Amino acid sequence: MQEQILQAFQRNANDEALALAQQWVEQSPGQAAPLGWLATALRQRGDIDAALAALDQALALQPEDAGLHLQRATLLLTGRQFEAASEALARTTELDPNQLDGYLIQAHMALAQRDFERAQSLSRVASRLAPEHPQLLAIDGMIALQQGEADKALALLNQAAAQLPDDPRILYGLGFAFLAKDHLAFAEQTFRKLIAVQPDSLPMMALVADLCLRQGHADNAAKMLEQMLATGKGNTAGVRRLAAMIQLQAGQPQAALEHAVASLQEGEIDRRVLQVALMAWQQLGADDQARQVLDQLLETHAQDHGLWLARLAVEQVGSEAAAAVAQRWVEAMPEHVPAWEVRMRLHDMLSQPEQAEAVARRIIELEPGRVSGEQRVVGALLERNEADAAVAHVQAMIERADEAARPNLRTWLGVVQDGAQRPADAVATWLDIRQAEAGERLALPPQAKSPMNWPEMAEIGEDTHDRPLFVTGLPGSGVERVLSVLGAASPVVRTDRFGATPPNDPFQRFDTLAQLASGELSAEALVQQWRDALPGRGIANGNIIDCLLWWDNGLLWSLRQHLPQGRLLAVLRDPRDMLLEWLAFGGSYPFALNTITEATGWLQRSLEQLANLHDQSLYPVALMRIDGVENNPQAMAQLLGQVFGTAFPVVNQLPPARLPAGHWRQYRDVLGAAFNNLTPVAVRLGYPEN
């Protein structure tokens, strides 16, 4: 009977095998072997519970049979009853210490539970029985993989796969060993073999799709996603979302759109799917279809913020059609402030200032203190030359605000006073803010006097390959805007001197100049300490763009002799605009402004040092004047291109330019003495006297 059942299994005649096993059990009551074969037949049919019941009957008749315990453990694993399976396997090896499969399955279970120490222990025991067994090689390979020994893992798993080419566990380990070595094509091929063995393995399909994308094969990734959708369990909103994204990347907007719309109609509104749908509609030129589908979705999802934004995106910016959509939005969500903000901006775009102001006041009713509404109301008052009312509005906001919000509101009060052409009031407001925050900011760095003679500039050796670039900019210079573009162009830009964990080197410490003068710090040690800190900043050599917290020509005592290959980029604006910007907004540099006189003197001396550096060619330096291009991304990229002789990317989101170039002239009557002190160095740097 056993031979007949085996033959039935070989023909995939599982029903026949089950009938034969049942017949054998009936003919041989009280025998364990027929019940074991019945359990095997039931397992082939997928009836795990019935198979376990048959095995329990067999074990009741023959409780010391290690093979039956192993068979039961395998069934428990199939049903994901890991704890019971572990007990059965332990009983297997207890009854028969030579039961190799028991050790192997326990080791695989330990790997699944990420108990690598136990897996290794079981592997050592099993190796005494069959040291070259392919499953043992696979277990050792997967342990090596977890221990970071990718080469060893790959060798062992390749050897195991040569003996058992279709074993899912071996293929799984081998695929991840290839991944650890970044052999993406081999990993993809291995996981595809695993899918052939386990055709319903959705995680493997998703992994293969990802590997295809990483290799630039979006079309193959799209095919794999279609295969996932063809399976019963794979046809989900999440898989459709992924398929939409990949089909769009593969250049198939129509297929992407079908999946995206199906996903949106089946489940929650997903922002990523909406984006794919919008891009597909745009590529297909199907605006009317987009309006129709989005309007249908809005019938059942009228409270969805992202869906309304998508609907607006179909219309031309600032058009009457866009305004009509925004009106529908506020009617559907009358308490939703972002909807009213869109409505307000569209009124402004359509030259409807009165309606825009009315909406702004509605926003303030819904959320008192909301910046967008408050700014629009104050702006309207200034436009009508109601300066007193504009200032009073902001002052009332300051009185109502909590302590944390007041500094920003007071800065804005100065801006409103500036807009109201009250420069004396603006200066008083800003100076009060700067003095209040002075205790939380750094004291101005000390400044060295220029010597009669500088040390000789060292020669740059032929074997010198590092060319560090130091970047500096005084408060109000707008250096942060230049750094935004440099950072987008180069991975070696470092602005960590302004962060929470700055490098501990002489360029960071304000006592460096005094230490150089006293001999406590040698000129050579300054550069060496800077170099020693570079690896901790992620720089493998001296090629770095290092934004300095401060600059002083006294550093040249060291740089001329020990870093002649370095360069300095100094970002400038008109010194009088720099002082005004520093006063109004504090500057990106964390330096205290205690009095206008002190700040002016320090700024004047710093600029004179830069002028001397440039005029006397004391060190390779480029003075980069950004006046007029502070908030123009294209012009900023072009200016940097002229300075460095190479193309730079356009960074559309530069830090904001606060006051326009030349605005200092509006403050001549209030800051005349300070401007007079700065005018000589301004002229020296190429700016007009008046």
Image (spheres, helix red, strand yellow):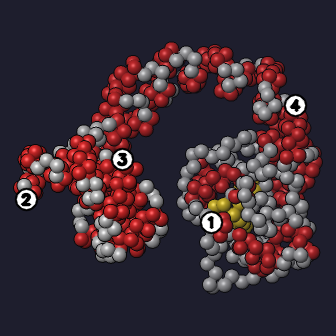
- Dot 1 or dot 2, earlier in sequence: 2
Identify the residue shown where x is 77% and y is 32%. Answer: 405
Q: Residues within 10 Å of mark 3 (few under 14, many from 20)?
A: few
Amino acid found under the numbered disc labelled 2:
Glu
Using the numbered discs, state the Cα–Cα distance from disc 3 to disc 1 in whole angstroms. 48 Å
Residue 200 is situated, as x and y percent measured from the top left of the image, at 26, 47
Does dot 1 land on a helix, a strand or a loop?
loop
Residue 559 is situated, as x and y percent measured from the top left of the image, at 77, 74
Which is more toward the observer, 100 or 528?
Answer: 100
279 left or right, relative to 205:
right
Q: Which residue is mark 3?
A: 81
Using the numbered discs, state the Cα–Cα distance from disc 1 to disc 4 in whole angstroms. 47 Å
Q: Which residue is mark 1?
A: 538
Q: Which residue is mark 4?
A: 425
Using the numbered discs, state the Cα–Cα distance from disc 3 to disc 2 in whole angstroms. 31 Å
**Residue 368, quarter of picture:** top right
47 left or right, relative to 510:
left
Of badges 2 and 4, the one in the foreground is 2
Using the numbered discs, state the Cα–Cα distance from disc 1 to disc 2 in whole angstroms. 68 Å
Q: Which residue is mark 2?
A: 3
